[in-house]
Image (tube, grey):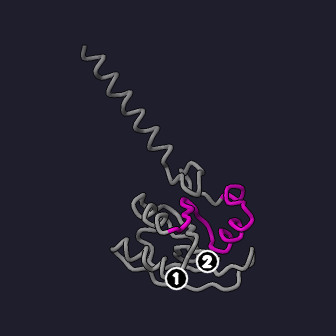
Amino acid sequence: MLIGIPIWQGRVSPVFDVAQHLAVAHMDEKRLVRMDELPLPGGDPLARVRLIEAHRIEILLCGAISRYLQRMLQRSGVSVWPCLCGEVQHVISAFTDNQLLLRGLVMPGCDGRTGGGGCNHGRRRQMRHRRGQQINNQERQQQ
């Protein structure tokens, strides 16, 4: 199994869309066999997807990621686990042990739904709801 992790200074890069390097973990069952590093193309989301496809990466463990890029990767058959943070080795270990949430490797402000939920999706929904309430209150006051 091949796991891709965008990296910055030995940690999961905070934003996949602008990360410059990708660590590729070659796994045998739950054991790390080898770790490679690839430069990520800048500016073109499709080029990033093609690079991940070309290297046959099956899983992407990352920090924040745009919905557009996440969908493109998922359509290519890549399982995307967004909103992660921490040292690369710790993230790989926690992932293989199914303990990402238990080990505190979810980015602050994320709703904890790794594997497809995304960062701040719950918070955005909450903010839209509050804005709607504010608009309704303003309309009532004007009447």
User: Left or right of 140: which side holds 86?
Assistant: right
- Per the image, label 2 sits on a secondary structure element best described as strand
- Residue extent of the magenta highlight: 77-104
Question: Per the image, is 13 magenta?
Answer: no
Number of marks in picture: 2
- Residue at 42%, 68% (x, y): give it: 17
> Which quadrant holds residue 67?
bottom left
Q: Quadrant of residue 3?
A: bottom right
Q: Earlier in the sequence, mark 1 or mark 2?
A: 2
Amino acid type for the residue under numbered disc 2: Leu
Question: Which mark is on residue 55?
Answer: 1
Q: Is residue 118 above or below residue 91?
A: above
Q: Residue furthest left?
A: 142
- Measure how far apart labels 1 and 2 are at the Cα level: 9 Å
Look at mark 2 in the image and give the residue it sits on. 2
**Quadrant containing the C terminus in the rendered view:** top left
